[in-house]
Amino acid sequence: MPTLLVHGWWNISGAKMSKSLGNVVDPDALIEKYGAEALRYYLMSDIATGYDADFSEPLLVQRYNSELANNVGNLMNRVLTMAERYSKSVLTKSQIRDEATTKLSELAINSSLWLCEAIDQQWQFHSALGFVTNFVRRCNEMIEDRAPWKLAKMADKEKQLKSLLYALTEAVRIIGVFISPVLPRAAHGIFDQLNWKMELSGKEERFRLEDVKWGGLPDGHVVGKPVPLFPRIER
């Protein structure tokens, strides 16, 4: 007996979509208005596989702005800006695993395990994306906690600063791998700005789960300058 993956009903304000009621959603119109990746992210992150759910255009915009523009996009911009400002965009891969590197690498590994379990065993794509969102949030929290701008003012903290910048940039690369099945265009945007696997730019071979392994960016790697990845949607 074949296995069928079936989603639940998509409702509008608690009512089933119906042509007679005129409450149907035109995906082509939404894509033209918000872009394919914004729509895909909302459908995959907000609607649990196998359960009924309400489709909400305002929630689509809210999720995009809060989780992609403010979360992923902001992290990308902050990390590359700091790399340019404090290390001339050159990464230093330390052989010493300090607290920051250890925390981020462990979180990346755990997130990949949880993500795979959510998809392989339960087909819960929204849960998998939730793990990614949490990983991004923890990276932003670490920036606030470690305050690289303060470390940059202390000569004896240079090694610690460079280790932190490497760990954060490596985390951004792994986040790109995590989001690539749902947001391939955005993932390419992340990798392009990181100058990573440029020979595979625009190709599906660039997205491989085995690349989640920590330490993919080599010592002395030069990253690019930040470019807005998820411009906010203004309604």
Image (spheres, rainbow, N blue to C red):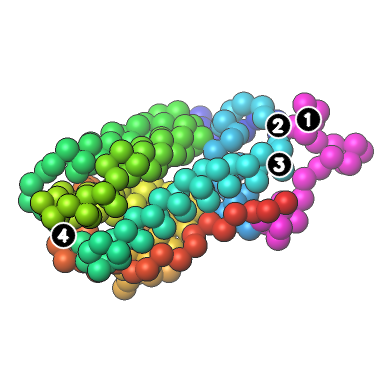
Occupied quadrant, residue 80 = bottom left
79 or 146, nearer to the observer: 146
Q: Which residue is mark 3?
A: 58
Q: Residue at x 27, y 67 (%)?
A: 89
Q: Earlier in the sequence, mark 1 or mark 3?
A: 1
Spatial distance from mark 4 to mark 2, Cα to Cα?
A: 47 Å
Task: Give the label on residue 92, or none.
Answer: 4
> Which label is found at residue 13?
1
Q: Which residue sits at x=56%, y=32%?
A: 49
Q: Which residues are magenta?
A: 11-34
Query: Residue 119: horizontal and vertical position, in percent?
Result: 43, 35
Q: Name which residue type carries label 3.
A: Pro
The mark found on residue 54 in the picture is 2
As for residue 208 lying within the magenta part, the answer is no
Q: CA distance from mark 4 to mark 1?
A: 52 Å
- Residue furthest to the right in view is 20
Q: Secondary structure at mark 4?
A: loop
The reply to whether residue 85 is in sight is: yes
Foreground: disc 2 or disc 3: 3
Q: Residue 215's spot in the image, x, y percent?
A: 19, 52
Decide which of tag 4 and tag 1 comes sooner along the chain: 1
Q: Are marks 4 and 1 in contact (CB under 8 Å)?
A: no
- Counting from the top left corner in percent of width and height, residue 118 is at 41, 31
Q: Residue at x 49, y 36 (%)?
A: 125
Is residue 23 highlighted in magenta?
yes
| Numbered label tally | 4
Helix, strand or loop under label 2: strand
Disc 3 vs disc 4: which is toward the camera?
4
Nearer to me, 180 or 172: 172
Q: Amino acid at mark 2?
A: Asp
Measure the alpha-carbon separation of dots 2 and 3: 11 Å
